[in-house]
Image (spheres, grey):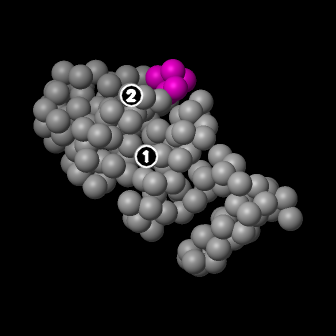
Amino acid sequence: MDIIQSLQAAEGYAMLGMHIEAIEELEKARVNFGEHPDLLEAALKLLMRKKAWDAAIKIGRKLCSTAPHLPVGFLHTAYCLHEQGRTEEAKSVLLQGPPDLENEAAYHYNLGCYNAILGNKEAARDHVLQSFKINKGFRQLALDDPDLNSIREFLD
């Protein structure tokens, strides 16, 4: 079985709600393919779906160190930290990501959320508005996001 088949099998299990089997499939693939970034990313996303934040952070940090050029590790690891109330740390992780992150709407949106939570309203507004410029869909997401309550008046 190649890595693509392993990832597809794990995703299939996950879609069926069979998370244990999905994790087992990824673990089997790691025997053959090691710490391949695609396997780490799949495991990270699976753990995030389960809201297994500690385990997701551990895998996310491994993804960041294994593939520092990939934005996804930094975005997801930061999100997991934020979900644990570790927002300052989340912001720090996100800011350590590759330069390509600055082209991602999710980067700006998440930085906006983190800054809003941390009381940096001007930076929060600027990042959230930048996310809207990159992807208009984030405006709808922002309408109900409790992280942005402190800057809601600036988003209209």
Above or below, comparing residue 69 to residue 5 in the picture: above
Q: Amino acid at mark 1?
A: Thr
Question: Local crowd at mark 1 within 10 Å, few (<14), some, or many (≥20)?
Answer: many
Q: Across the whole image, how many numbered discs are drawn on residues? A: 2
Cα–Cα span, label 2 and label 1: 12 Å
Q: Quadrant of the C terminus?
A: top left
Q: Give 54 or 45, whichever is nearer the viewer.
A: 54
Q: Secondary structure at mark 1?
A: helix
Question: Residue 33 occupies which quadrant of the picture?
Answer: bottom right
Residue 62 in picture, x, y percent from top left:
53, 47
Residue 20 located left or right of residue 116:
right
Q: Are marks 2 and 1 in contact (CB under 8 Å)?
A: no
Q: Which residues are magenta?
A: 98-103
Q: Secondary structure at mark 2?
A: helix
Above or below, comparing residue 155 to residue 32 in the picture: above
Residue 26 located left or right of residue 48:
right
Task: Choose the circle earlier in sequence order: 2 or 1.
Answer: 1
> Magenta span: helix, strand or loop, mainly?
helix
* Label placed on residue 95: 2
Is 58 magenta? The answer is no
Residue 29 in picture, x, y percent from top left:
73, 63
Is residue 12 at all visible to an observer of this figure?
Answer: no
Residue 114 in picture, x, y percent from top left:
26, 37
Question: Residue 124 occupies which quadrant of the picture?
Answer: top left
Residue at point 74%, 63% (across, down): 31
Residue located beneath label 1 in the image: 77
Q: Quadrant of the N terminus?
A: bottom right
Residue at point 17%, 27% (across, down): 120
The single residue placed furthest to the right in the displayed view is 1
Is 101 magenta? The answer is yes
Q: Give 49 or 146, whichever is nearer the viewer.
A: 49
